[in-house]
């Protein structure tokens, strides 16, 4: 049997994993990345619990003394669950044009698998602790995310006549509002219309009618479309 302080030691490791994962996720969250605060925390927490379960099973059932022909290592089961749950999590992630949904759900599925393994291994305090941390991250930390000045991204699509220097004028109009642009694509149609696609980075700002008007008044512009890249 394992010593009585095993749960306490592992609880400290889980809390540390949660803290470190949250720190990384907070940095990504501020920069508006898809996998943010809660997702990183849940993934880090789940990984720590998988490791704790593997250690527990090794201590309980492992026999590598050489007295038996084969050493028993039920910890391999935990490793296979880690691999298998990845396919289930991938099925929960949905990409719809510029939006990605389901990342936090996928992380929750991973956490649920870890909790199930821990309970099956006879670890009671650890899965209760993990469930509590996960619930706090999903409910309470969501409110914190709402007040952070985060980077957000949007796809800007502009249809225009093939006018020389039009792309430069569009970029100047967008940057004049305080937005930043990242690599873009250009599509030229047979009827002389050119479609410019640009990714717009917005830090603490939002799209307004002024933003669209600044581009719409440019000569040759036929259509302007902004699409926020939503993540859940």
Image: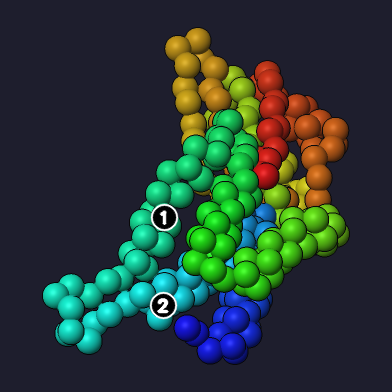
Which residue is painted at 76% across and 49% down in the image? 176
Instruction: Looking at the picture, tell me which residue is in the foreground, 25 or 173.
Output: 25
Q: Quadrant of residue 208?
A: top right
Q: Is residue 9 above or below residue 80?
A: below
Identify the element where label 2 is drawn: helix
Q: Does the CB distance between marks 1 and 2 fall below 8 Å? A: no
Which residue is painted at 70% across and 50% down in the image? 152
Query: Which one is closest to the eye, mark 1 or mark 2?
Result: 2
**In the image, residue 197 lies at what x, y percent?**
56, 34
Q: Is residue 51 visible?
A: no
Q: Is residue 217 visible?
A: yes
Identify the element where label 1 is drawn: helix
Q: Which residue is mark 2?
A: 60
For marks 1 and 2, the one nearer the N-term is 2
Instruction: Looking at the picture, tell me which residue is in the foreground, 188 or 27.
Output: 27
Q: Which mark is residue 81?
A: 1
**In the image, residue 155 lies at what x, y percent?**
63, 37
**In the image, residue 44 lies at what x, y percent?**
56, 67
Q: Is residue 193 above or below residue 96?
A: above
């Amino acid at each position: 049997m394992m010593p009585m302080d095993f749960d306490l030691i592992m609880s400290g490791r889980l809390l540390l994993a949660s803290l470190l994962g949250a720190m990384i996720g907070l940095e990504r969250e501020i920069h508006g990345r898809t996998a943010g605060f809660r997702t990183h925390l849940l993934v880090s927490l789940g990984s720590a619990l998988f490791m704790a379960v593997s250690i527990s099973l090794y201590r309980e059932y492992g026999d590598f003394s050489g007295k038996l022909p084969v050493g028993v290592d039920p910890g391999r089961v935990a490793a296979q669950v880690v691999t298998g749950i990845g396919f289930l999590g991938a099925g929960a992630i949905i990409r719809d044009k510029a939006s990605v949904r389901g990342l936090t759900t996928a992380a929750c599925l991973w956490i649920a698998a870890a909790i199930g393994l821990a309970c099956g291994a006879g670890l009671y305090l650890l899965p209760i602790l993990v469930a509590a941390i996960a619930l706090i991250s999903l409910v309470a930390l969501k409110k914190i995310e709402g007040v952070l000045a985060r980077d957000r991204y949007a796809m800007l699509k502009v249809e225009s006549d093939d006018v020389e220097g039009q792309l430069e004028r569009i970029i100047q109009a967008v940057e004049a509002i305080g937005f930043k642009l990242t690599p873009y694509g250009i599509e030229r149609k047979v009827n002389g219309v050119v479609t410019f696609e640009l990714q717009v980075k917005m830090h603490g700002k939002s799209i307004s009618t002024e933003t669209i008007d600044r581009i719409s008044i440019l000569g040759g512009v036929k259509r302007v479309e902004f699409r926020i890249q939503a993540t859940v």
